[in-house]
Image: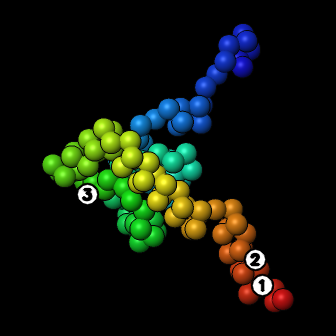
Amino acid sequence: MDNQGRKTYTLWDVYPHADLVTYPSTYEGFGNAFVEAVYFRRPIVVNEYAIFEADIKPKGFDVVAISGFLTEENVERTRRVITDPAYAAEMAETNYMLGWRYLSHEVLEEKLEQLLVNYYGA
């Protein structure tokens, strides 16, 4: 609520209602919007920026990938995401499971523990 009692909204209010998330950046860090879209089980259209190419793409996420410009294939695949709910759900669920495997808090905890053990010893 704002100071006048009106509801304020965040992106977290919007994600559950999105048919897909477009992420056409040419330069990004790791990409919180990407992780948020995965978390909310939303299909993703993403430009293949450098960190996506190096750190995210090799993990096998199922996205509509744009390499700097749109192709007819990108447009057709995006159209299918919007018009075929089963296809969109399958894409989003695949990404969610990959997110769980590679991006979850449990994975972070395990990797941090390994780093600390390597540094300080058991």
How far separated are the C-alphas under marks 3 and 2?
36 Å
Residue at coordinates 46% horizontally, 51% vertically from top-left? 92
Residue at coordinates 41% horizontally, 72% vertically from top-left? 58
Q: Label 2: how many residues lie within 10 Å, few (<14), some (14-19) or many (20+)? A: few
- Can you give x and y, in whole percent of width and height, for residue 14 in the image? 53, 32
Foreground pick, 49 / 79: 79
State whether residue 9 is above or below residue 104. Answer: above
The amino acid marked with disc number 1 is Val
**Does residue 19 appear left or right of residue 11 in this picture?**
left
**Does residue 57 appear left or right of residue 37 in this picture?**
left
Colour scheme of the picture: rainbow
Work out which residue is located at the far top of the displayed protein and give it.
4
Q: What number is the disc on residue 14?
A: none
Residue at coordinates 70% horizontally, 66% vertically from top-left? 106
How far separated are the C-alphas under marks 2 and 1?
6 Å
The residue singled out by tag 2 in the image is 113
State whether residue 6 is above or below residue 85. Answer: above
Name the image quarter holding the N terminus: top right
Q: What number is the disc on residue 117?
A: 1
The amino acid marked with disc number 3 is Ser
Contact flag, marks 2 and 1 (Cβ < 8 Å) = yes
**Does residue 7 appear left or right of residue 74 in this picture?**
right
Badge 1 element: helix
Name the image quarter holding the C terminus: bottom right
Q: Is residue 31 visible?
A: no
Residue at coordinates 57% horizontally, 50% vertically from top-left? 39
Q: Quadrant of residue 81?
A: top left
How far separated are the C-alphas under marks 3 and 1?
40 Å
Q: What number is the disc on residue 67?
A: 3
Q: Quadrant of residue 67?
A: bottom left
- Can you give x and y, in whole percent of width and height, for residue 8 in the image? 64, 22
N-terminal-most mark, 3 or 1: 3
